[in-house]
Structures are given as structure tokens and as C-alpha cells.
Image (cartoon, grey):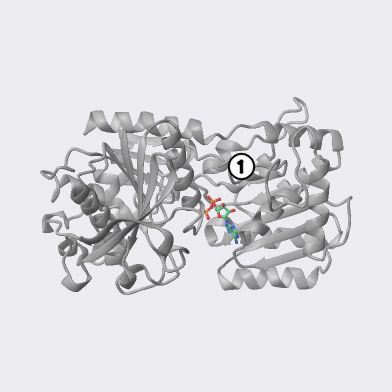
Amino acid sequence: MKILHITPEIAPWSKAGGLGDATSALAKNLAALGHEVRVATPLYGSVPGREQMGTVLDSLKVDVGGDPAKAACRVRSVDLAPTAQVWFIEHDDYYGAREIYPAREDTAERAAFFGRAALDACLQLGWIPDVIHCHDWTTGLIPVLLNTTLKSSPLGGCATVLSIHNLQHQGLLSRRILPFLRLPEWLFKPEELECLGGVNFLKGGILHANRIITVSATYAQEILTPAFGFGLQDVVLRRQAHLDGILNGVDLDEWDAQKDKHLAKNFSAQDLAGKRACKVDLQKQFKLADDSQAPLVGVISRLWDQKGLDLAVQALPKFLRTGRLQFVLLGSGDSWLEQEFRRLADNFPGRVGIRIGYDQALSHRIEAGCDFFLMPSRFEPCGLNQMYSMAYGTLPIVRATGGLADTVRHWNSTTQQGTGIVFQHADVGAVEWAIEQALALYARPEDFISAQKQAMREEFSWRKSAQAHVACYEKALQQR
Ligand code: ADP
């Protein structure tokens, strides 16, 4: 198949969270299955090496309204795999700044432009995909375009698939986007794109894509309910028959404890000795006491309400006071929560290490050096860190939601089966309970090592995920 992905993030060039990891690994694995893949994405100011990139189209006229002087772009390219190429949409007015999601007045046009540019690049090159796979809200109006304005163009027969990586972010913006994208005004009604007086990008995608994917089976069920639907649950319900849950995977080029270059020492399920060296290395880096009795619990996360880390910051002092664990965190987000974690480090020197910021190398060392990894998320569409943790023998402590529920098996001391600690409720008491369970497991070294080995042997393969995507593309093609 010829498959075009349209995405605002692709690792390693641009990544704000799991979306960047997912699009990159999916494109590579689809190519490995023999498909021809293109990934269209903005060329942000933070992407290095643009001068070394190839040029697909030097000047592409993009069919949008607004200022005609802003309606052209360049399309640069980089090979991701022998049959997979990234198309970078270069337009410095829109994407020249370093941030992926800056707060700007022209957010709607900026989100819409690169998708429309990707379609115009296909038309200009005569490269007509079988499937157009859109990712998250910025690309939500592409399936709408293909069902209306572009219906009788050569792209009108393409099957469309929308992946929802996070339903919370919907792109509720001004209706001025309709004339900008040359979309008909009749779409501005509640049964279509209208929502609270604006145009809802993601709603458009959900209603118009041939198929919809969410990134885990449990999240596909959760978003049908008011608690997780963020107001779009009824819209998703209308399309439930066309909804699939497909789990992301672990990119072994990036996350392999036996080969990872960031680690003090490599290790495997057969030989865990190197993991001890990784823990000592991490304790040194964060100036923690060399305490081998206390487990080291880690977090790498955006510090947002979704992630439930406000619960963690309340639960942890009880355990830190009695010296029963050590804690490290890498992340950034809400400033009040950053402040709370800084205060935790001040209150427990030698037991808590906090790094506010984004640091890829350090994220690998935390995954490898910790004994447990905490994810008390209120909702988690898929979650990647719990899978990276398991691959590195670090047992996840997770709330049973979305992809966390689908990937972590709660340790059962009777059957001696399990890969982590799973709890149900998003409250401080539940987090405390889960940490108690983790401490009890750590206190039984044989059980702890058995759980570590089971976790490391879990297979979260992108190949399997890519095959499930192909099956979904086939359904989309039949339904087009
Ligand atoms: P989300 O996409 O909701 O942020 P995921 O668990 O799906 O959550 O993916 C997060 C990705 O971003 C993981 O690869 C994680 O390691 C990475 N990440 C998050 N915060 C940081 C940080 N501060 N430094 C380095 N990597 C981070």
C-alpha cells in the first residue's frame, strides 16, 4: 500500500510526548512490512540539519485562503527507511519558531496549513496514496476536506484513518478556518463541525474519517463515556462501529537495555548485574544516599493534571519520612506542581532528586536505574513509559486506565505472576496502597526478581502493532 501519515510530531525531529515516538516507529514498521510510506510534518525551527535534507518540491502553491503571500511552502525530505520518507513542510512564518504547540493567534491556520500542503504535494507529484492516516486534532479537518472540497479530485478515493492519541486536545477554534481551507459553510452546524460556537478540528476527523483508531483497547471503551470523552463521547458513540483500539509498541532501536548507549552498564533478563550499576549511577547523578535497602521510584512525565502526579506528591512524604524509598523525577509542566516537587527535594535531601526540564539521555538512565516507575494517571490513552520500564526490568506502578490497564499485570503472590502494581482509584489513598504493595514486593527479593524477569520478557512489538494498523487500513479501503 501507499500510506501517507500527516502528523504534528515525529521523533527524533519533533517530540512533545508519545505521539512523536509512535509516528516514527509506526512508519518504520509499515515500511518493514513492505509498504510505501510518506510522513508529512512541519519543519519547526528546532529541527536540525535542514540544509542537508533533500528537496521534494522547491516551491509548492498550497490551496488555502488568507494572505496569498503566505500560501506557498517548500517540501524537504529525509529517508526514514528504504521505503519510508519524511516530508518536512517548510514555512517559516508558521513553523520557524522552535515550539511545536506555541500559543499564537493563528493557531488554526498553522494547524491546518501543513495538512493541506501535504495533500497538495501529493497532487503535484502525482503520488496518490491508498490510505491517508491523520494523527490527533491538528489533522482533524483532512478527512473533512477529502469528503467535500476534494471529493472529486484524484485524492477523493483515498481511505482516511484518524488516530486519537489524546481526546482531551481537540482544537476548538474560530470558524474562519472554513474559508481558509475552502471548506463549505454548511459544515458549521452542531451535527457537523460546530462546537460551542467554534469549529472543533477533532470532531471533524471523528465524523469524517473512514476509520478511527485509539491507542489502546481500554481507551477505545473509555472515550465512549462522559468521564473520558471530554464532551465528544456522543460523537465517538456515533462512530463506534468504526473504532479500533491498537496499542503502540516499544521501538527497540531506541529502548534496548542490552544496547542502550546512555546507560552506565547494559543488562538483560538473563543477567541483571548491570542494572545495579545503573542504579548507583543514577543515585550519584541525583546526589542520593547509596542505600541498597530502599527501592528507587522514578517518574518521567509532563506535569499535567492528566498524569495524576499531584496525588504522588501528596502520597510520597509518608514513605520518605521513614526512609523507606528514594524518588527521582524528570519532567516539566504546571509551575505549581514543579514547585511542589522542588519543595519535596528540599525537604528530603539525599532521598529525592528532581530535574525540571526535558532530557532524553537522562530519561533512559532513569528507566534503567530505578526499581519502580510510577504512573498514577487519571487517564492514559496508551502510555509508553510503562512499556519502556518493563523492558528495562523496572516495575511499573500504574492506575488501571487506558493503555496502562492493557499492558501491566498486577503481581499476584499466590500464582507468582505479574509485571507490576496496578491500582484502581485516582486518589491519594490508592497511590499509598500501591506504594505499600511495591515495598512489600521489593522486600521479597525472589518475587521481585521473578516479576522483573516477567516484565522484561513481555513483548510490546511495533511489528504486531503495524500489522494491526494494516488490517485497519484494509477495512478503511473497503468502506471508502
Ligand atoms: P504523553 O504522550 O501523554 O506525554 P507517553 O507516555 O505516551 O505520554 O509518552 C511520553 C514520552 O515522552 C515518552 O517517550 C517519555 O519518555 C517522554 N518524555 C516525557 N517527558 C520527558 C522529559 N521531561 N524528558 C525526556 N523525555 C520525556
Q: Is residue 234 visible?
A: yes
Q: Residue at x 41, y 70 (%)?
A: 102
Instruction: Using residue 109 as the reference point, say whether residue 366 is left or right of it.
Output: right
Most foreground residue, 165 or 100: 100
Kind of element beneath mark 1 = helix
Instruction: Using residue 33 as the reference point, say whether residue 458 is left or right of it.
Output: right
- Considering the image in quadrants, where does the C terminus appear? top left
Quadrant in the picture for residue 365: bottom right
Q: Residue at x 17, y 55 (%)?
A: 189
- Image x and y of residue 214, in percent: 42, 42
Q: Residue at x 24, y 28 (%)?
A: 478
- Image x and y of residue 358, in percent: 59, 64
Q: Is mark 1 within 8 Å of ligand 1?
A: no
Q: Is residue 191 visible?
A: no
Quadrant in the picture for residue 343: bottom right
- Considering the image in quadrants, where does the N terminus appear? top left
Name the residue furthest top: 415
Label 1 sits on residue? 387
Instruction: Using residue 419 as the reference point, say whether residue 29 is left or right of it.
Output: left
Most foreground residue, 12 or 455: 12
Q: Quadrant of ligand 1?
A: bottom right
- Image x and y of residue 20, in percent: 47, 52
Tell me the kind of residue under disc 1: Met
**Above or below — where is 394 with respect to 190?**
above
Mark 1: give few (<14), some (14-19) or many (20+) Cα within 10 Å: many
**Above or below — where is 176 with respect to 143?**
below
